[in-house]
Image (tube, grey):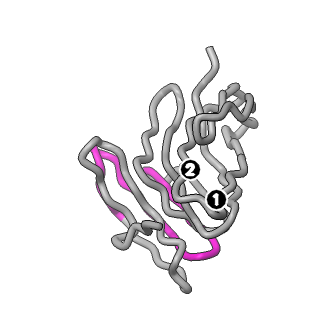
Amino acid sequence: MAVISELIRSEADGTISFGDYSLQTKAKLDNFEHEGDIYKVKTFQEITKLERNGMFVYESVPGTAVSNLNVTDTGITFGVEGTEDAQITLELEAETEYEITIDGVNAGCMKTNLGGKLSLSVELENQDQVKVAVVKKN
């Protein structure tokens, strides 16, 4: 499994990768600049959290490593890995329906709440990496 030892990094394809679920104590990195946005990451074995420009983007309990996070107007895609199943919360558009796909399997539709939060569970135990796509329904 590949943790992100530098806590957060820019990838060649314009996405970002972040998180280190192997840490015993909390680690954070502020003021990471990527494509004009400022990111903050907090991560360790119990939780991984990402903020962009002071706004919530991603949180997992327990901690995870996220690769190639790509946030667009129509949704969010990323790969995630960890030592055990994780509850992931994402900040998206408020009161909007999204199609969720986990490792190529349609996991159904979910609607965000008034605050735009969407929570999903991902089975990570005994997996290398799980691909997640959350795409706005038309």
Quarter-of-image position of residue 81: bottom right
In the image as oriented, which residue stretches furthest toward the bottom?
Answer: 24
Residue behind mark 1? 124
Q: Position of residue 131 (x, y in %)?
A: 53, 44
Give, as a three-letter code, the residue at label 1.
Leu
Label 1 Cα neighbours within 10 Å, binned few <14 / some 14-19 / many ≥20: some
Query: Do the CB atoms of the residues marked 1 and 2 lie less than 8 Å apart?
Result: yes
Look at the magenta stretch and give its main secondary structure.
strand
For image coordinates 29% across by 50% down, the residue present is: 11
Q: Is residue 50 left or right of residue 137?
A: left
Q: State whether residue 75 is above or below residue 8.
A: above
Residue behind mark 2? 130
For image coordinates 43% across by 66% down, the residue present is: 2
Q: Earlier in the sequence, mark 1 or mark 2?
A: 1
For image coordinates 67% across by 38% down, the residue present is: 116
Q: State whether residue 10 is above or below residue 114.
A: below
- In the foreground, 129 or 13: 129
In the image as oriented, which residue stretches furthest toward the left?
Answer: 12
Give, as a three-letter code, the residue at label 2.
Val
Report the span colored magenta: 31-52
Residue 119 belongs to the span the image colors magenta? no
In the image as oriented, which residue stretches furthest toward the front?
Answer: 126
For image coordinates 60% across by 24% down, the residue present is: 136
Alpha-carbon span between mark 1 and mark 2: 7 Å
Is disc 1 placed on a helix, strand or loop? Answer: loop
